[in-house]
Amino acid sequence: MKVSTDRRLRLAGGFAASAGLTGFLAGGFLVLLLATGAGLPLGESLSDRYLRGVVLFTLEQAALSTLLSVLGAVPLAIALHRARFPGRRAILRLFLLPQALPVLVGALAIVAVWGRNGVVSDALAMAGLARLDVYGLSGILLAHVFFNLPLAARLMVAALDEVPAESWKLAGQLAFSPTTTFRLIEWPAIRQVLPAAASLVFMLCATSFTIVLVLGGGPGATTLEVAIYQSLRYDFDPGRAVALSLLQIVLTALLVMAATRLGGDSVASFGLGGRTKRYDRTGALLKLADGAVLALGLLFIASPFVAVVIAGLKADLTRLLTEEAVIDAALTSLWVALSAGLIALLLSLPILAAIEALASSERRSGSRLGRQSRRALEVTASLVLVVPPVVVGAGWFLGLRQVTSVFAAAPYVVVLTNAAMAVPFVVRILGPALATGHRRSEKLADSLGLAGLSRFQIVDWPAIRRPMGLAYALAVAISLGDLGAVALFGNREFTTLPYLLLQRMGSYRTEDAAGLALLLGLLCLTLITLSESATKLRHRSGR
C-alpha cells in the first residue's frame, strides 16, 4: 500500500468516525423535533430577558470556574512534578476520580464538607465565625473547582513530563534558580496546554447540570443546561430545548476556537506520571512550600472522598454486596461501561489518525485547507462535551418508541451516548502521544514506504501503547459514573449503579446510597489502577 493511499484511508476513516459521532448526536436533536412536530423558536429564545440572564450566568460561572481551576492547578502541578515520594502515582490516580465520581455524589459530598452543617462550618462556628453558605454562585464555583482543578493539574503534569530530559540536565548543570527554571522550562511547557486545559474545563462548567441543580439556589443561578432540562421536564417544549442547545453549542464553539488560536495544541494528554527525572536543585524552603501546596491541594480534593468513605462505611456493606439488585446493577454498569469504553477508543483512533495525516500534510506544504480541516476535527471531538445528553436521549427515546420497544433499545442508546461523551477525554490522552510519535518517525516511515497495518504496528502502536490503558480506564470510569443518559431509560430491567443510587436517595435510604457511592468509587479506582498497571507491564515486557 502506498503512503499516499494510506493517508487517504486515514482521512476517510477519521472523517467517517467524526461524521458518525456527529450524526448520532445531531440525530437526537432532529428526531426530537420531527417526533414532536415542534418548531425552532430561535428568535423568541434570544429575545427572552430571562434567558439572556441565564446565558450571562452560564458564561460567568464557567469563566470564573475555569480561572480558579487553572490558576490553582499551576502551582499544584509544578509541586507534584517537582516532588518525588512513594505515593505520587496514587495522588495522580486520585486526581482522576472526580471525573469518574457521579456528580450527584460529588455535590452532596461538597455539602457535607463545606455546607452550613458541614465539617468546615462546624470548625468556623467553634472559632466564633459565621457558617458557610454553599448555595448559589459560591457553591457552584467550589464544586466546579473540586471536579476540574485535578483534571487541569494532570494535563499540566503531562506537559511537564514531555519536557526533554536534556532541559532538566542543563537546568541542574547551570544551577538554575526555581524562578529561572519556571521561566525557561516549566512555564513554556504549561503554556502549551493552557488553551486545551482552559477550553476543556470551560466546556465542562458551561454544561454543568447536576451541580447547578443541587447548589444553584434558585432562578438567579440557572445555566443553559438546567434551562434545557426544564424545557423538557416541566414545560415539554422540545423546540425551545433544541434552540437553547444550539445556542449553547454555538457559544462554546466560538470560545473554544478563540482559545485554540491563542497558541498551543487544542488537545493535551493526562499523562501517567513518573517518567521524568529532574536535576534542578531545590532548597529546604522550596521543599517546604511544595509540601504546603501539595497538602492543601490534597486536602481540598480528598476531603469529599473522605466524606463519602466515612458515610459509606456506616452502611451495611455486607448486605449491599449480596443484594440481588445491587449485583445486577453492578454487572449492568460494568458491561455498559466496558462496551462504551471500547467504542470510544474505536471512534477516537480513526479521528486521531486523520488529524495526524492532516498535520503531516500541513508540515510538508503549509496547506491552509489542511490546517482548517485538522482544527475542524479537533473541535468536533471536543464539542461533544457541550451537547446535552438529555436532549440526545429524549430524541432517540421518542424516535425509537415509534419502531421498537424503547426499553429493549435503551442499553444500546446509553452505551453509544456514554461512548460519545468519553471521546474528548480519550482524544486528549492519546492525541499528544500519537503526535510525538509521528513527529519522530514519520520521515523514516515515509521513506521506507510503511503503510496500513505495518505503519500502525511500527509507528502508531508504540506511541499509544502506554497511555492506551489510561484512556480506556478513564472512558470506562466516566461511563460507570454517568447518570444523565440512563436517567431517561432506567427501569427495573435496566438499572446501573448510579441509577440505583439515585433511587435509594429518592426513597430516603441514605445509608444505602452512601454505601453504593463508596462501592462505585472503589470500582472506578480499581479499574484505573488495573489498567495503568497492565499497560506498564506490557510496556516493560516490550509486547
Image (cartoon, rainbow, N blue to C red):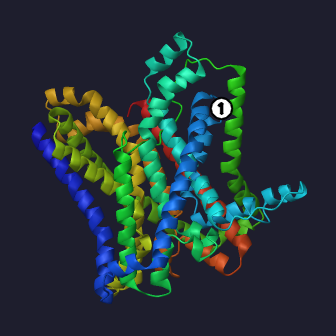
Return the x and y of residue 154 as percentages of the image width and height.
52, 42
- Image quadrant containing the C terminus: top left
The foreground one among 278 and 274 is 278
Side (left or right) of 72 relative to 302 = left
Residue shown at the point (46%, 78%) measured from the top left: 49
Q: Is residue 342 above or below residue 293?
A: below
Q: Secondary structure at mark 1?
A: loop
Side (left or right) of 498 relative to 398 = right
| Rendered image quadrant of residue 318 | bottom right
Q: Is residue 162 visible?
A: yes
Q: Is residue 114 above or below residue 492?
A: above
The foreground one among 431 and 127 is 127
Label 1: how many Cα within 10 Å (few below 14, some 14–19, many 20+):
few
Residue shown at the point (62%, 55%) measured from the top left: 522
Residue shown at the point (54%, 72%) measured from the top left: 222
Return the x and y of residue 440 as percentages of the image width and height.
29, 27
Q: Is residue 140 above or below residue 390?
A: above
Q: Is residue 487 above or below residue 434?
A: below
Q: Is residue 343 visible?
A: no
Residue shown at the point (38%, 62%) measured from the top left: 251
Amino acid carrying mark 1 in the image: Pro
Return the x and y of residue 157 as percentages of the image width and height.
52, 36
Side (left or right) of 458 relative to 12 = right
The foreground one among 432 and 237 is 237
Circle 1 is placed at which residue position?
86
